[in-house]
Image (cartoon, grey):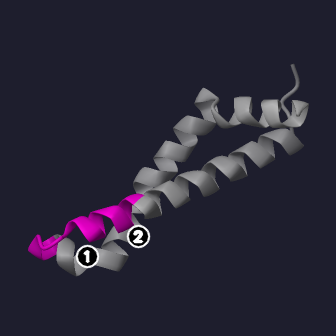
Amino acid sequence: MAAFKIALELWLSKKILYRSIKTVLFMGTILAFINHGDLIIIGALTAEYWIKMGLTCLVLDFVASWTGNRAQMENPEPA
């Protein structure tokens, strides 16, 4: 339980959240254009595609946060 609490605190830390958001904005934009670029350009996105792009960003956020969290737990900064 203590490890979970530490992991959650790291996950929600400013440092990891900031890096995750930057990753999501950059990679999410690239993936949105790869997957739906034609619809974005002609302006034909439906609610279904917006949901798909949102879910893609959530997955990216999870992966970026998880990676940052694991790295921080395995190599903690000296106090």
Dominant SS in magenta: helix
Q: Quadrant of the C terminus?
A: top right
Quarter location, residue 12 = top right
Q: In the drawing, does residue 15 fall left or right of residue 26?
A: right
Q: Where are the magenta residues, as a range?
A: 41-54
The answer to whether any part of residue 29 appears in the image is no
Which residue shows up at 23% across the image and 65% down it?
47
Numbered circle sitting on residue 77 = none
User: Residue 11 location in percent, x, y?
Assistant: 67, 37
Q: Quadrant of the N terminus?
A: top right
Q: Sort mark 2 into few (<14), some (14-19) or many (20+) by Cα contacts within 10 Å.
A: some
Quarter location, residue 32 = bottom left
Q: Sort mark 1 into few (<14), some (14-19) or many (20+) by Cα contacts within 10 Å.
A: some
Q: Is residue 40 above or below residue 18?
A: below
User: Residue 18 location in percent, x, y?
Assistant: 53, 36
**Residue kind at label 1, given as amino acid type:** Gly
The answer to whether any part of residue 64 appears in the image is yes
Total labels drawn: 2
Q: In the drawing, does residue 79 fall left or right of residue 54?
A: right
Circle 2 is placed at which residue position?
31
**Residue kind at label 2, given as amino acid type:** Leu
Q: Secondary structure at mark 1?
A: helix
Q: Does the magenta run of residues contain 71?
A: no
User: Residue 42 location in percent, x, y?
Assistant: 10, 75
Circle 1 is placed at which residue position?
37
Which residue shows up at 55% across the image and 45% down it?
20
Q: Secondary structure at mark 2?
A: helix
Which residue shows up at 56% across the image and 42% down it?
19
Q: In the drawing, does residue 6 fall left or right of residue 65?
A: right
Q: Does the magenta run of residues contain 48?
A: yes
